[in-house]
């Protein structure tokens, strides 16, 4: 999973149940309350803790015996709860580490320990048999010796800084700290700049003793802890590097490893802060800029001179079998309308927090739904519960499954609801904005275990407090403004990537949500390390597993309401307003870039960069920014204006006339919600990475997991691809017009005469 | 001196000499150019370096033999250069340290070393005989043992945070890090909150190895370096604590030490980061908030529990003699119009950077002016050069002299120009905004030693680059906007306190400027330590002393132009626009506070602070903000509107008709500039600190050295003294109306008919 350090980045409101069920009738509402009460009765935190203890008892990476055993265990449990369940396997490329080393070879010598020693009091951390070493997936084998350069977080801006400092990484090994962007961008950008190797370490400033007491005294990353992870270039496509766009079934046509564009070409290794200090202290050259300083007790230098290192990494590159568990409960009324819900079960080591903390909630939901079924209840729509394998190496289980079943999923899938790591704290939901109001409604009906108010009310309080604190960022201030108005729903955030929703939302065009609690579960310090254990999690992540319960109740309600609703729960005004805000951001971005380019041109002409320089520590002038033209965003502006009107007409019609429609029309309206979302993923996809088809939500090319909204247009502005700006403004406008067409169709279904009026 | 870490916080433009001399005639302009060329010929950097080496050879604190010898040396030099010079002494309270200790007494033990050992390669640092120990001036004697609490920077906001964390400093010893506000506020606020002692240390994050390589490898503060300083409560008044408002002459009436309000009541000690680490590592209690983290390799805790410390400090509290050198060159035309120029000569230890780096420039000016005089030239106005003693303990030399000669200075003083520490880099000028254009004119005529362009052009480049960098603060962005327009003068900043201009600007009402170069002279790490040596300075501060030369040429031009100008060099439109901007800031402040109070009231009513809390790490709700009423700022708004008109009329009249006036009118106009500035310091002064009379510029009650503009009004808003807001809006309006009256009088002098028209 991706690591969410703090939550509150998107989400809800406190509304009464009656209003929360939208256009449902009163008797429906009462039935829902009763159903959810019975559902809740099966949610038992202590039982979930027991499941975690069992599932996180041994290392759970792809190919490990315990991970396969977990899949079989989950299969048996789903079956025992009355689900129609099976294991579906794929054959994927997965490099298993053979050897790795990193040493300083000059001017002094030091060999990195690369060892996460057992922690006193944590029995799990002593079970190191079969544990993956320091390692990242889909790097390249390699054995290089070269000067070492510190590149801060190793992001785009850092290379611009290095260029101005006159430091090249060509032919060198870079050492980058974790943070400020997705892990995999660090070696990719290093490789793009000519580096021959890349080491990533966890600086205590961001992730270690500077943040909290280190484990075992506190929850923070110990000096010898390191972060594993995937560096497959998921900005191109996730899943098996050898089978882009198709399922990695046994007989699938495969790329050669050397041709797989998402596999890096240089060796990469993650190391601990304790190891890193020896290398960083040996660097000479310029003292780093202030923003590059970490918290190790040294002066940070850029290096590139005498300090040389030797990096060697080797893996076994065969295909491995992965094990998805697929559990179905067939819908009694609309069997071909599917509600999908998933969480992965593989972990980098034990994986207590990531992924078991979310997985146990999903299991609890499945058990509770099974209990309802055993009492004679059946969902109206089909439920599909999915326990994914191989999420950690880059969403392989979910991606290969989604690609294999693409046709059926596009026909039947209404929504995919994901969870992953979970912990104490605040509700965080990101996803399709048509579901924002449904999310708020659910959040109003689940109690927060720590305070007793609803999880929505608690999140509202947090957004208020965070966004009115001195120095709050503009985005937080805007959210506080919304949160301070009790009449407004809390906003949900946009989805980028980093967990198993990606294929459904961005490739297939299903509505999707990702749900978690967090912000108080202090598990970031053991993320992807051998210390992410049951012992650590039950002490710091969610003592008593009460937030596992809250997650099960929250997602369970979403699943049940989507499965049972007579008429759609979507509200399209929320989507229209959100997209409108995204366009405002893009316009502001273009204006800001235009002003910056103009100012920079003046300064370059006047020699300002040279004159502002300290002659003893000179920097070159920056690379000239391209002059920014004015763009034709009119198609997009027109489409959004129309979308707002269509959405308002639809929401109003549904609210006024929805409940009185025939069963057939109601079913057609729900069917239409699927078709509506699908318009956002036209076949063309995004420039240079057509696997990603969603024109509203995508992981950023240079942010990784973090979302870029209106990505075709926004990234074209950011990356100075001017032609693409107009092209993607038009493409996105077409998609939104198609979206509005579907809404108009919905209005027509509910009231033919009214729809024809609203067209004029 | 105060420490200015980076410059560019205020200042100028590239204009032709002709225009830079305002209403001067062409022949006057050519005479000026010639005079300044001859002046420059006497500025010899190597000679200045020699003076520094001599003056910084031994410790130079108040009462030291070498400091007195320096005064005598300077006296002799002034005399040898043809000046009428004398030493003027005062008898001031100055506590000389006898003993000091700080030790951890539980749960472990450690005794602070409090020792700045000699540095290899720095011969000066080995001359420790007679050197002041770890010590701050005007703390109290004391011997206390108590629990230790870490209070971050020890500023107001930090105590609000502590209160919410449920940590009291009552009866405890606080340990604060240097930074974020003036040193003396730390023990004062600690004392106000009931602490019994205060220790201040230099965290490597702000001042040490995190910023640069430590001395001697680089310029940064070594782990055993500490910062001495004064903690006299200068927000009430500077100077001798026993003689507020009057000169500390031998027979002056004195307060008892115990009654002196600027002397603290608790013991205080500065310590090094190396010593501090032992104490901070021993603290328990809550982990600190992120903004409180330093760069020591520990987890920072708030403490207040088991960790206890023993602090003992003792001084000898007798009166000491201080030695100002006063050198005069009588004006040939206007002997009763004085141009004052000063720099102090005392230092905390050797004082190479602070104050000698500025003092040698002043000496060079005096020598160059002496050389002009020896060639037969005489200034039209009287020049008074002042080498101050006892600036470091809190501006004693200048304050006592200003108070002693208050009557004459108010009659004759036109301007006071100060310098203090100086170094490689960019021009930084702060002061009276009526002189902003004069400053820009001078900056256009002095060459930067490193780049060859004018120091004004170089500063303009820096403001452009700094204010267009990603993440630049709003103030920097505003300055860049100005700097990118070649037609606009660069802004100068406002003066707070921290050097010898304070009495002249804020108590007497003279126009004042403080001038330095800096931003590249990497001397911050030895500020007020025993490592502020000739060796350190000549290596890092200003190799070759070329910026001492630039400072002498810059201030020399200011002095000569002010001394020689036929008509005023002031431009009052700059002042009017600046004050108008200050009022906008105050209005925005009030609106922001009003919104914050309203939002907070909602959140308190809804229990948001409780709900947003992590129950395992609770914080109390904040102290309720007072509801903010609307204020009557109309008098001030009207006064500023009028001021803008009067200023424009004056500037225009001077520009059009100034040169053609009679000698008598010209002299009267210059005389009027003094009267104009004086209107800003009505007798009433600021609330609770009436020594400070300037209603436009003051050191902040809770910022210390940093300026608060429109202080009567602004601080009343900040401190929730609502009655004072309206009261000081009216008082400040009166002062500005009186200011505008003087400008109207100037217009009348130049063109009686025009002035009467502009009144209507």
Image (cartoon, coloured by chain):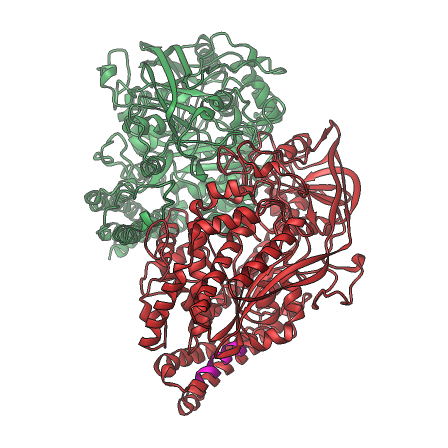
Chain colours: A red, B green
Q: Residue B452 at what x, y percent from top left?
A: 63, 38
Eyeballing the image, is B27 above or below B416? below
Taking depth in this image into account, of A479 and A532 the one nearest to the observer is A532
Q: Position of B614 compared to A77: left or right? A: left
Where residue A300 sits, quadrant-wise, is top right
Left or right? Give the position of B443 relative to B710. right
Asked if residue B741 lies in the magenta stretch, the reply is no
Can residue B328 be seen here? no
User: Is residue A668 rendered magenta in the image?
Assistant: yes
Q: Which residues are magenta?
A: A665-675
Measured as percent of width and height from the top left, residue A326 is found at 59, 65
The answer to whether any part of residue B313 appears in the image is yes
**Residue A374 placement (x, y as % from top left):** 45, 67
Task: Name which residue lies at 68% across and 46% down.
Answer: A163
Describe residue A388's horizontal placement relative to residue B524 as left or right: right
Q: Quadrant of residue A491?
A: bottom left
Q: Is residue B129 above or below residue A420?
A: above
Q: Position of residue A468 (x, y in %)?
A: 36, 51
For residue A304, side relative to residue A348 (left or right): right
**Which residue: 58% across, 44% down?**
A57
Vertical arrangement, residue B734 with respect to residue B373, above or below: below
């Amino acid at each position: 999973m991706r690591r969410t350090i703090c939550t509150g980045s998107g989400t809800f409101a406190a509304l009464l149940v009656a209003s929360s069920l939208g256009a449902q009738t009163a008797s429906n509402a009462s039935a829902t309350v009763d159903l959810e009460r019975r559902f809740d009765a099966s949610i038992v935190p202590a039982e979930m803790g027991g499941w975690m203890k069992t599932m996180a008892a041994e290392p759970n990476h792809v190919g490990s015996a315990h991970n396969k055993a977990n899949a079989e265990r989950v299969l048996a449990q789903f079956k025992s709860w009355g689900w129609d369940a099976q294991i579906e396997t794929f054959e994927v490329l997965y490099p298993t580490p053979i050897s790795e080393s990193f040493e300083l070879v000059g001017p002094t010598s030091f060999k990195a320990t690369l060892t996460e020693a057992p922690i006193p009091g944590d029995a799990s951390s002593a079970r190191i048999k079969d544990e993956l070493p320091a390692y990242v997936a889909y790097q390249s084998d390699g054995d290089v010796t070269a000067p070492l350069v510190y590149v801060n977080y190793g992001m785009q801006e850092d290379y611009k800084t290095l260029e101005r400092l006159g430091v090249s990484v060509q032919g060198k090994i870079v050492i980058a700290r974790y943070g400020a962007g997705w892990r995999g961008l660090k070696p990719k950008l290093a490789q793009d700049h000519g580096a021959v190797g890349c080491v990533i370490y966890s600086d205590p400033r961001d992730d270690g003793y500077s943040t909290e007491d280190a484990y075992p005294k506190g929850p923070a990353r110990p000096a010898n802890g390191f972060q594993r992870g995937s560096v497959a270039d998921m900005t191109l496509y996730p899943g098996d590097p050898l089978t882009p766009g198709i399922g990695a079934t046994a007989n699938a046509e495969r790329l050669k490893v050397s041709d797989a564009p998402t596999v890096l070409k240089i060796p990469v290794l993650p190391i601990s802060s304790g190891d890193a200090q020896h290398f960083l202290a040996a660097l000479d050259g310029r003292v780093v800029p202030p923003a590059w300083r970490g918290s190790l007790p040294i002066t940070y230098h850029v290096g590139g001179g005498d300090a040389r290192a030797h990096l060697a990494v080797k893996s076994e590159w065969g295909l491995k079998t992965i094990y998805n568990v697929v559990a179905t409960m067939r819908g009694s009324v609309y069997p071909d309308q599917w509600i999908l819900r998933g969480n992965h079960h593989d972990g980098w080591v034990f994986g207590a927090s990531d992924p078991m903390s979310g997985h146990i909630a999903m299991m609890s939901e499945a058990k509770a739904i099974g209990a309802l079924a055993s009492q004679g209840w059946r969902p109206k729509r089909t439920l599909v519960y999915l326990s994914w394998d191989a999420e950690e190496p880059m969403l392989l289980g979910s991606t290969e499954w989604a690609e294999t079943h693409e046709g059926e999923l596009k026909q039947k899938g209404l929504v995919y609801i994901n969870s992953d790591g979970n912990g104490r704290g605040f509700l965080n939901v990101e996803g399709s904005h048509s579901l924002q109001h449904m999310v708020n409604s659910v959040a109003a009906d689940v109690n927060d275990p720590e305070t007793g108010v609803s999880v929505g009310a608690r999140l509202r309080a947090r957004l208020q407090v965070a966004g009115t604190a001195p120095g709050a960022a503009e985005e937080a201030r805007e959210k506080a403004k919304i949160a301070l108005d009790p009449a407004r729903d809390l906003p949900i955030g946009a989805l980028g990537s980093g967990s198993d929703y990606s294929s459904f939302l961005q490739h297939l065009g299903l509505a999707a949500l990702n749900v978690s609690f967090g912000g108080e579960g202090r598990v970031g310090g053991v993320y992807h390390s051998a210390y992410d254990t049951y012992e650590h999690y039950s002490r710091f992540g969610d003592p008593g597993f009460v937030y596992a319960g809250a997650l099960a109740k929250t997602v369970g309600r979403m699943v049940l309401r989507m499965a049972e609703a007579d008429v759609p729960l979507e509200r399209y005004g929320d989507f229209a307003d959100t997209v409108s805000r995204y366009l405002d951001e893009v316009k502001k971005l273009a204006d800001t870039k235009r002003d910056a380019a103009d100012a920079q041109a003046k300064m370059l002409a006047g020699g300002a960069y040279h004159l502002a320089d300290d002659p003893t520590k000179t920097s070159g002038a920056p690379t000239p920014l391209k002059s920014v033209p004015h763009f034709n965003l009119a198609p997009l502006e027109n489409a959004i204006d129309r979308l707002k009107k269509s959405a308002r007409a639809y929401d109003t019609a549904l609210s006024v006339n929805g409940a009185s429609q025939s069963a057939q029309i109601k079913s057609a309206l729900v069917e239409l919600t699927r078709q509506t979302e699908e318009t956002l993923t036209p076949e063309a996809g995004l420039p240079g990475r057509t696997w990603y088809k969603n024109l509203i939500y995508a992981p950023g090319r240079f942010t990784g997991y973090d979302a870029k909204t209106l990505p075709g247009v926004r990234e074209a502005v950011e990356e100075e691809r001017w032609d693409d700006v107009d092209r993607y403004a038009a493409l996105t406008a077409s998609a939104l017009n198609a979206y509005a067409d579907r809404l108009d169709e919905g209005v027509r279904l509910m009231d033919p005469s009214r729809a024809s009026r609203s067209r004029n």
